[in-house]
Amino acid sequence: MAEPAASTERDQRASALARANEVRIARATLKKELRQGKIRIEQILASPPECVAKAQILDLLVAVPRFGPVKAARLLNTAYVSSSKTVGGLSDRQRTHLIELLRRSPPPKSTTRNLVVPAAASPRTPRPSGPRSPRARGLRATPDS
């Protein structure tokens, strides 16, 4: 009598595995389309397909061409969304706020690279221009005797 129960368990596992593989393939296809620019992240967030309901929002944002992990995390912080939040777990307010932020023009490249540090605030001290040791200057140490 244990055989029918075991076979149904195996069938359930096999069907769950097949379903999980289908979801993974659909998610990978969606991320590929995001990278290629065929679909926009705003469209996915506005009406998410079933395959991305349990996907983390950070993973989808990183698939967008102009977003890396840091920029995606900053965007989520601006929208008050946890980086571990799933697409299906977003509230209406979070979803609309994210879509609004994503529709804005892309932010400038980086402001920290273009900053000029004044010389007075520089942590380095200038090196002396001449040689530093007597040997480097060609002088020999003389015995004291």
Image (cartoon, helix red, strand yellow):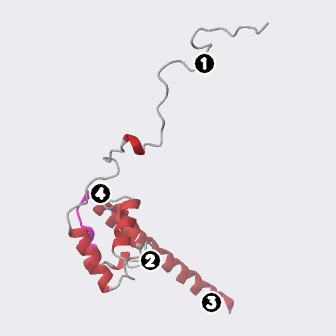
Which-is-in-front pick, marks 4 and 2? 4
Q: Foreground residue, 12 or 114?
A: 114
Please say if the residues under marks 1 and 4 sit with CB atoms less than 8 Å apart: no
Q: Visible in this render: residue 3?
A: yes
Going from the N terminus, do you reach mark 2 or mark 1 first?
2
Asked if the magenta segment contains residue 42, the reply would be: yes
Q: Position of residue 138 (x, y in %)?
A: 59, 8
Give the quarter of the figure containing the N terminus. bottom right
Q: Farthest residue in the bottom direction?
A: 1
Please say if the residues under marks 4 and 2 sit with CB atoms less than 8 Å apart: no
> At numbered mark 2, what does the secondary structure look like: helix, strand or loop?
helix
Distance between the alpha carbons at the discs numbered 2 and 1: 74 Å
State the residue position of label 1.
133
Distance between the alpha carbons at the discs numbered 3 and 1: 87 Å
Going from the N terminus, do you reach mark 4 or mark 2 first?
2
Asked if the magenta segment contains residue 66, the reply would be: no
State the residue position of label 3.
5
Amino acid of disc 1: Ser
Label placed on residue 19: 2
Q: Which residues are magenta?
A: 36-45
Please say if the residues under marks 2 and 3 sit with CB atoms less than 8 Å apart: no
Q: Callout 3 environment at 10 Å: few (<14), some (14 to 19), or many (20+)?
A: few
Q: Farthest residue in the right direction?
A: 145
Quarter of the rendering containing residue 120: top left
State the residue position of label 4.
66
Distance between the alpha carbons at the discs numbered 2 and 3: 21 Å
Q: Visible in this render: residue 47?
A: no
Amino acid of disc 4: Arg
